[in-house]
Image: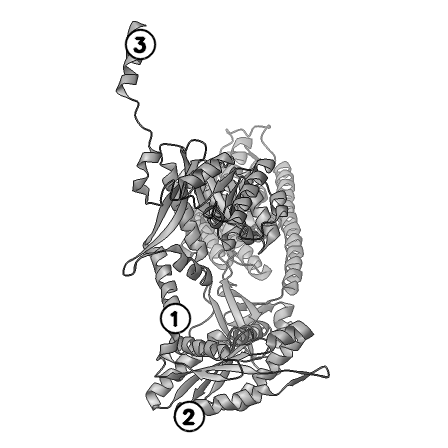
Amino acid sequence: MLKVLACLTTEHDYRLVGVAAVVCFAACFTAFRLYSRMRGAKGLVRAAWLLLTGLVCGSGVWATHFIGMVAYDPGLKTGYSPTGTLLSLMIAVLFIGSGFVVASAQRTRTNDMAGGLILGMGVASMHYTGMTAFVTQGHIVWEHATVGASVLFGVAGSTAALILAGRARSIGKQILGGAILTLGVCALHFTGMGAITIVPDTSIVVPEQLLSGGFLTLAVTSITGLIILGGLGAVAIESQTTRSALERIRRMANAAYEGIVVVQDGRINDANAAFCELVGAPLEEIKGKPLFEAILTFDGDEASRDGVRREGFLQPLEGGREIPVEVFSRLMDDGARTETSGLTVLAVRDLRERRSAEEKIRYLAEHDGLTGLPNRNSLQTRLAAAIERVEASGETLSVICIDLDHFKEANDQHGHPAGDALLVETARRLQDSISAPSFAARLGGDEFMVVQVGAGDQPTAAAELSGRLLDVLATPVMFEGQDLAMGASLGVSLYPDDGRTTESLMANADMALYRAKEGGRGIYRFFKREMDESIRERRALARDLKQGIADGELVVYYQPLARASDGEVCGFEALVRWQHPTRGMIPPLDFIPVAEENGLIAPLGEWVLRRACADAAAWEKPLRIAVNLSPLQLNNPALPTLVHEVLIATGLSPHRLELEITESALFKDYQRALDNLRRLKALGVRIAMDDFGTGFSSLSTLQSFPFDKIKIDKSFVENIHRHDRATVIVRAVLGLGRSLEIPVVAEGVETQEQINFLRSEDCAELQGYAIGRPGPLHTLDAWTKVAPAPVAAQAPKRARRSAA
């Protein structure tokens, strides 16, 4: 050690030693500044920062070495080999850059130590490679122990610098890291210089072409200074860009609707304007304050885990009511930095408006918007709870269904505001007439329901309340200076006599109401099981039909249509039948009206369409298939799409499908029906008017749409030659068809006399028992299959082929 100190004090120029130290510190400090920018970068930008870090630090350490070498004066002539000088520069940049790369790979102490080892070994390699470029008049003798100590100094300084300042963002720690690395580099250099002894030898000649000390000092200092200034300039530019980006981010954060707060170790590090407004204090006042428990509270575990969404309450600093909030947390990660460990960003959303909206939505979901009474869904829930109560307590319960008698008249004569006034007043009077736990509800339209709970013996209590309600609702309502007539009809069902479930009690009260309205209105009726069998029967049939459609109990029968000219079958009409598992075969006249009343006609019609098209597509002969459309189907905007999809699925040619409609079906929604017919026509499907003569029979209908066929109703055909008027009507319709060039089909043909008459009048097609009765698919083979050619007719063809 004394030799090293002696070498430093007696054989070095202090001025150049100082320059070397300044250059080394500037380079090391700049390297750590550049290294800190790399931490938040990725991809090519990260690689560029690492490359610049290695270049600045390596060139600075290299410059420190050669300025220190120039400061060394052994008293002999010296020079520097250009090859060794440049080689040592490349070694310094490569090794030192590699050290920073290893240290930056992961945020661990192990990587910092590994990077420091590579960096220190790189400084040592650069130093001793540079010593090979040193030429003097003498022989250099090395002390290997001192050389080893110099390497240890370099490695220790490099490792300590990376551990202390490798992840630093602050300038203070970067200065400290640069100083430690500078000490390590200088300790390695001057210890290494103290490890040599030069034995003079006048026979050794120093070539003149070697680099001189002055030139080397100037060149090294200039080049290194430019590199360091370039690195500092890059840092300055990037810092300014970062500050501008941060300002933009802050402006964006302040423009956000949600509050945004950055938390470090449980304390507020930063926040946007929206969060400060929620807390009721400026950023300067809340910065550094603990966030959790003091300002933001949650149920359960902490809310700082990554990706957690929680709901809690925020307490404003100035006091007042807690604010319900929704918090979404995200851990910040801009690389491995010790200063910001545990940094979390929380997005805080004020839930007051949403909670208020949810309360309104919940209220509207359970209450009628006009009257404020519970709606149908809420009624069912509350009635179910009331049934459970009376089952447990033994109290009584009745359900009273109420329908206003003069509501439609008020609406028609005075408009909807008058109708609304009647409904609101009805609700008020119902509520005034009962007390908890009884309650009233509005089912929809002018229909209300009262549930009477625990009022005494039944049916006496229900009769007393019903009579009181009739009196209360009979008083007119004043609206805009006019008396609006009031009145109501009531139906009553009792628990448990008339039902033990919500559905049965409501349904039976509704049936009792139906009987009250039949009895003249303004009265109440109790449910009587024996007088409602017909209603129950139709409802049971509707339930069975719905299940029957799902279970495949429906069957399609096919009735043939024949050309009137030669009697050849040219198509079939699909007629649905219902094979009930217990009631047997049910005809369409019994279940089609039930399907229409209960909304089952659409699935029923779709099933018939699919089944008929699939069966017809399998026939060997390309015969037409006719399918009837209900008014509901005809007015469905999705009908053309459905028909198109069925044709594609079954492979049936569009021109083989005929859709039959009644003229009365057109007038439910005339324009929509015509639009659907035109779209079906565009698909290539044929359209026939069924039961012509029984509906409006308007010529304007035939003018509005080009029908492909007209079917005369069987009520006229069966009276040909029986009633003169029927014969004239049939003849007129056939003449009309010929004039419009629309084929006419006669339904209900049962006798040869009718066939002869229709042929004589040029009727196009015939349908009826005289042609064929409706039958299931397997009975149609005689008409749908192609008959094989006779053997006698085939023999001459074979003979002709043989002769050829």
Camera sees residue 669: yes
In the image, taking residue 756 as reference, residue 700 lies left or right, namely right
- The answer to whether the residue labelled 1 contacts the one labelled 3, judged by CB atoms less than 8 Å apart, is no
Residue 257 position, x and y percent, is 62, 66
Mark 1 or mark 2, which has the lower sequence index? 2
In the image, taking residue 462 as reference, residue 373 lies left or right, namely right
Provide the residue designation for mark 1: 534
Callout 2: few (<14), some (14-19), or many (20+) C-alpha neighbours within 10 Å?
A: few
Residue 507 position, x and y percent, is 42, 75
Callout 1: few (<14), some (14-19), or many (20+) C-alpha neighbours within 10 Å?
A: few
Provide the residue designation for mark 2: 460
Which residue is painted at 51% across and 31% down in the image?
A: 202
Name the secondary structure under disc 1.
Answer: helix
**Mark 1 → mark 2, Cα distance in angstroms:** 28 Å
Q: Is residue 227 above or below residue 324?
A: above
Amino acid under disc 3: Arg
**Mark 1 → mark 3, Cα distance in angstroms:** 74 Å
- The answer to whether the residue labelled 2 contacts the one labelled 3, judged by CB atoms less than 8 Å apart, is no
Amino acid under disc 1: Ser
**Mark 2 → mark 3, Cα distance in angstroms:** 100 Å
Name the secondary structure under disc 2.
Answer: helix
Residue 801 has which mark? 3
Mark 1 or mark 3, which has the lower sequence index? 1
- The answer to whether the residue labelled 1 contacts the one labelled 2, judged by CB atoms less than 8 Å apart, is no
Residue 712 has which mark? none
- Quadrant where the image shows the C terminus: top left
Q: Is residue 36 above or below residue 745?
A: below
Residue 120 position, x and y percent, is 46, 48
Mark 2 or mark 3, which has the lower sequence index? 2
